[in-house]
Image (spheres, rainbow, N blue to C red):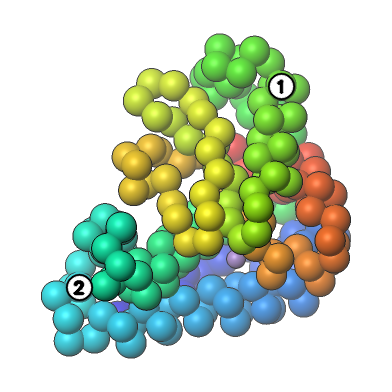
Amino acid sequence: MFELMMLPYGMDALEPYISTTTMEYHYGKHHRTYVDNLNKLIKGTEFENMSLEKIILATAGKPEYAAIFNNAAQVWNHNFFWNSMSPNGGGKPKGELLKKIERDFGSYEKFREEFKNAAVSQFGSGWAWLVEDGDKLKIVKTSNAMTPIVDKQKPIITIDVWEHAYYLDYQNRRPEFADAFLDHLVKW
Ligand code: MN
């Protein structure tokens, strides 16, 4: 049985950028529902004792396992998203990661522009990510539950751009949510 992860901060810790109400719905209801659905779907199946990552890799791209994949990947993506933020986050990374960003994007500012653009331009529900692909950093977008670990990419940070992630606080202003994530929340 999978359990809903513990948040690394309080439900009100990301205020005013992400409200307690959003956390109550997003973590407390949406994320919890993915965990509960996954547990129901894998009960008594070959997936019952697998790790979350193994379930994702074993079900990706197989239409007969779409429901298991979607719920497993959404659990993984949300676990990663909550860990991509901190109440004291935001701004530039330091050290080796900043050097790699400058190497692969030209500057932090250019990276910031491209990451924000990916978050804003993802059509419909999905995610924007900074990943390490081999030895190169890349920005990728995924739709719905899709996750870069399926493509053997190593996620560094992610932003959830499903409407449930920002609509209560920002309504249709997804660009403002992306700004808040980058400038006030991202944990490098
Ligand atoms: Mn979400």
Please, what is the three-letter code of the amino acid marked with disc 1?
Lys
On residue 110, which mark appears?
Answer: 1
Q: Residue at x 27, y 63 (%)?
A: 62
| Residue 24: image tag | none
Q: Please say whether residue 170 is visible from this viewpoint.
A: yes
Contact, CB < 8 Å: mark 1 with mark 2?
no
What residue lies at 72% left-to-right and 37% top-to-bottom? 117
Confirm or reject: label 1 Cβ below 8 Å from ligand 1. no
Name the residue carrying label 2.
47
Element marked by disc 1: helix
Report the side of 7 relative to 176 (left or right): left
Q: Ligand 1 appears in which quadrant?
A: bottom right
Q: Quadrant of residue 128?
A: top right
- The quarter in which the C terminus is drawn is top right
Q: Residues within 10 Å of mark 2 (few under 14, many from 20)?
A: some
In the picture, residue 31 is in which quadrant? bottom right
Query: The disc labelled 2 sits on which kind of residue?
Result: Phe
The answer to whether residue 159 shows anywhere in this view is no
Q: Secondary structure at mark 2?
A: loop
Residue at x 30% of width, y 58% of height:
60
The image shows residue 167, relative to residue 21, as above or below, that is above
Residue 118 located left or right of residue 41: right
Residue 94, above or below 128: above
Q: Position of residue 155 (x, y in %)?
A: 46, 41
**Between residues 22 and 114, which one lies in front from this camera angle?**
114
Residue under the image location 32 percent in, 40 percent down:
152
Q: Quadrant of the N terminus?
A: bottom left
Q: Percent position (x, y) of residue 164?
A: 69, 70
Residue 173: image location, x then y, percent: 85, 56
Q: Which mark is first along the chain, 2 or 1? A: 2
